[in-house]
Image (cartoon, rainbow, N blue to C red):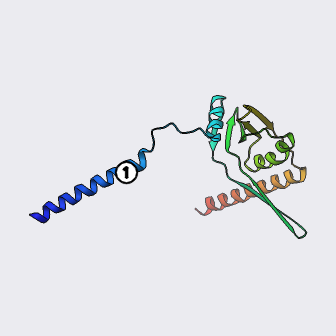
Amino acid sequence: MISGLALVCALVAIGVFLRSLGGALWSGDEETPVEGLKTMGRKWLEANGYELVKGSERVTHVTRVASVRLSGSVRPDFIARKEGREYAVFVRTEPASEEELHERYALAALLHGARGAVVIDVMQESVQTAVYEWNRPRHVRRREAARRVLWALCGALVALVAWKHG
């Protein structure tokens, strides 16, 4: 009888301890959190009709020249869509130069499949938008078209064989 009562008391004490521990871990402070750059950027995008489509990944690049190995990386804060066009979005505390929009952000937009870049400067409350046009060489377009035709022919051949022998 006493061991049963001791067991119940121990379970109640463990329950109270776990409840207070969980309350301390998950309740947090009641203060309003500070808005970060990304939160401000997200609010601006949503207020101006952009739709956030997916997470972005870091784009890294390595260049080897003679005995030197150079590397760099760039990661958009968001990928957003407006009027059927996707943009790589960067939230910063200073405006980007036109050279930066052309050279650095164009590569990140291309590799993410975006057609442009948006740089949101939260300190000066300004926005820069760049739209890129990718004109690939004719031989690259022809090679891609030939590869697609070959894959389509292989698929048709497999379907024909499956239909005849199935």
Residue 16 % position (x, y):
28, 52
Quarter containing the N terminus: bottom left
Asked whether 121 or 29 is in front, the reply is 29
- In this view, which residue lies farthest toward the left? 1
Task: Name the amino acid type tagged 1.
Answer: Gly
Residue 130 % position (x, y):
80, 37
Q: Quadrant of residue 2?
A: bottom left
Is disc 1 surrounded by few (<14), some (14 to 19) or many (20+) residues within 10 Å?
few
Picture layout, residue 60 above or below residue 100: below
Taking 20 as reference, is 48 left or right?
right
Residue 87 % position (x, y):
72, 40
- SS type, badge 1: helix
**Residue under the image location 53 percent in, 39 percent down:** 33
Picture layout, residue 98 above or below residue 68: above
**Residue under the image location 65 percent in, 58 percent down:** 159
- In this view, which residue lies farthest toward the bottom? 67
Taking 163 as reference, is 30 left or right?
left
Residue 124 % position (x, y):
74, 32
- In this view, which residue lies farthest toward the top? 48
Q: Quadrant of residue 54?
A: top right
Quarter containing the C terminus: bottom right
Q: How many marks?
A: 1
Picture layout, residue 11 above or below residue 101: below
**Residue under the image location 13 percent in, 65 percent down:** 3
According to the image, label 1 marks what residue?
A: 22
